[in-house]
Amino acid sequence: MAEKTISLLGVNHKTTPLAIREKMALTTGYEEPLRALGKIPACHELYLLSTCNRVEVLYVSEHGADPLEAVAQFLFGGTISVEEREQYLYRYHDTDAVKHLFEVAASLDSMVVGESQILGQIKEAYRYATEVGTTGPILNRLLHKAFSVAKRVRSETGIGSSAVSISYAAVQLAKKIFGELNEKQVLLIGAGEMAELAAEHLVGQGVGGVVVANRTLSRAVDLAKRFNGTSCVLEEVLSQLEAVDIIISSTGSSELLIRSEDVKPLMRARKNRPLFFIDIAVPRDLDPELNKIDDVFLYDIDDLSQVVEMNKAEREKEAVKAKRIVEEESLKFARWQQNLTITPTITAMRRKAEDICQQELEKTLSRLSVDEQDRQKIEKMAQAIAAKLLHDPMVYLKTESCKNNDDAKVDMIRSIYGLGNEDSGGN
Amino acid sequence: MVKEISFLLFQILLVVTCCGFAAYLISFISPKKGLKNVARTLLFVSWILQTLYIVSRYYLAGYTPITTHHEAVFFFAWSMTTAYLSFRWRHTVKNFGMFVSGLVLVLLLVAAFSPREIIPLEPALQSGWLPIHAGFSLLAYAFLGLAFCGGLMYLLQERELKSKRLGYFFSRLPSLEALDQLMTYCLALGFSFLCLGMITGIIWSKQAWGTYWRWQPKEVMTLIIWFVYLIQVHQRFTVGWRGRRAAMMALVGFGIVIVTLWRVVA
């Protein structure tokens, strides 16, 4: 019987510009392309992932009959030339393909390493593939393994805890100052893009409310509507400081908007509840002296970048750990796949039967007083029973049925006889 | 027989507490989930052993063992463990256990190095008020000790946030808000027990010496402690003193508590 090869080919944000990815993004949903790909004769099992950052096809084929051309042809349609296609497309086989899938699932290959969205996307893609019926025993196991690898990476490394961006850093700091953010008020001064992004992140963390202050009130009103907040003019900012907790400032003003002397007297009225100033304007809007007031924390754009750099360094350390986990798990999977052929399965069945015979014989014979001759007879009988019981399953395994089903057959026999791989505990 | 058991109990609980602290410390340095549970269990076992030790001493002495230096410091450690476990039951504050178990261990070590023989108590002092007074006072100090740990953690975390060098402690310590709440809670409870300790002490003094207040060094120090914490409680609950200043005060207050215990008790 021919061996099976797992192959993965695809494009992602690293290899391929957006303009090309756009052309291939599968706008019709998963079902149609899955059906079309399923018609390629050499593909036994198949799964397709399409997100805004990547398009990948994972398939299982007979060794030597690689349907790579056909799959690639389908992915790109006729939009670009073959030479150009070769430049963008990456392909992996067997252990490399498994490793790549695990890395993607564990978010090691993402644009923002450690983000958790990708796992959900893979799960969805897999659900479609099972519904259409393009997956088989190998891919079922592989995908489930990928989910558990992602889970392991998440729980054993800190990779998810330090996503990197200015706005993430702002949220991270706010959480260390305020603990829970759900009753905190955010004041947005100026309506720059970066301030908006930071505010969005904070709202995503469930802050209590947003106030937008801007030179032109109409813009403030628009933005406030987006965050379900209120708006005010720039002159009112100081009076707002009594009520808000987090201030994000990003005006184009050339002079300082809030001075240390303005805030100091306010702290008494605030009952010393902490204030967190985030200054993303260049030149700065906020007095650097603010940071010297007790319970007031001021971070400007440079400080935040420094935090981001720190997170990056931390993340790289964690990525090394994560890579090791991926490596380990892909080796385990390779071992499982090797066993998924007929010969090792038959050997394992025989060994198991022999072990059981041996155990039971020892148990029984030690309690009986029989002479050597009888003893041999009993042993023979036990072996004969075992062999006869195994005969039919073995015949079943060896029949030349539809070749595609070999893996399924082997997998079934292995699970019926409890010949699961000893090393991986999971399913 | 009981004497040997009591001695053995003390040695074992010292070892258990030591292991507990070590487990907390390791899980502080390289966070792993399982180890923290081990540490918590060890501290709980240590608490049970501590309780048994106190019972054994009660049995030996015939009165609440809270009068010698060894006993007072040990009882202090026991109330600190009790206070922490009761606090932990309601709130979790990240890595708080490491600091508290460290402090408990230090107290136990101090107790280990002070003479352990049982000194018979003057009949005049033997009164039902003694265990109540000493119990309340030491429980008060225990909660103030927790506030001290919280204050220490607050200052460490605040320094990293202010200096903008987010290093070792940033990820390992909880948020400032959580620490401030911890301090508020422990201060309120600690101060309440302190007041109860003062009142019962005054009653006991009347009973033992016939006068409510004798201006003994111990009494003067206690009065100072009471004032220091009175100011803190007042400022916190009216003006809204909190954060760095409050954390500093928690440290200073507990410093005076330790000096008092060191110099005057026993």
Image (cartoon, coloured by chain):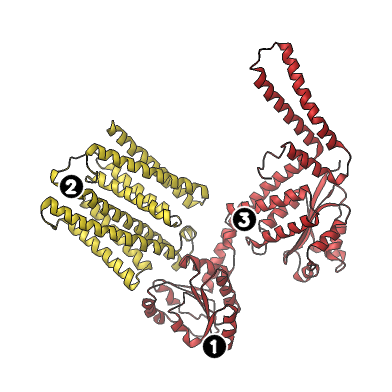
What residue does disc 1 label? A215
Give me the C-alpha separation between circle 2 and circle 1: 74 Å
Relative placement, left or right, of A51 versus B129 is right
Label 3: chain letter? A
Task: Give the residue type at disc 1.
Answer: Arg
Cβ atoms under marks 3 and 1 closer than 8 Å: no
Relative placement, left or right, of B32 versus A355 is left
- The image's mark for residue B127 is 2
Q: Which residue is drawn at 65% across and 21% down?
A: A363
Which one is in front, B163 or A223? A223
- Residue B41, position in %: x, y? 44, 45
| Tint of chain A | red
Q: The yellow chain is which one?
A: B
Residue A391: quarter of image: top right
Task: Give the residue type at disc 2.
Answer: Ser
- The image's mark for residue B208 is none
Which one is in front, B129 or B188? B129
Q: In this view, does A103 lie above or below A19?
A: above
- Residue under disc 3 on the same chain as residue under disc 1: yes
Q: Residue at x 72, y 15 (%)?
A: A375
Q: Can residue B206 be seen in this view?
A: yes
Of mark 3 and mark 1, the one earlier in the sequence is: 1
Give me the C-alpha separation between circle 3 and circle 1: 44 Å
What residue does disc 3 label? A319
Which quadrant is the N terminus of chain B positioned in?
Answer: top left
Disc 3 secondary structure class: helix
- Residue A190, position in %: x, y? 55, 82
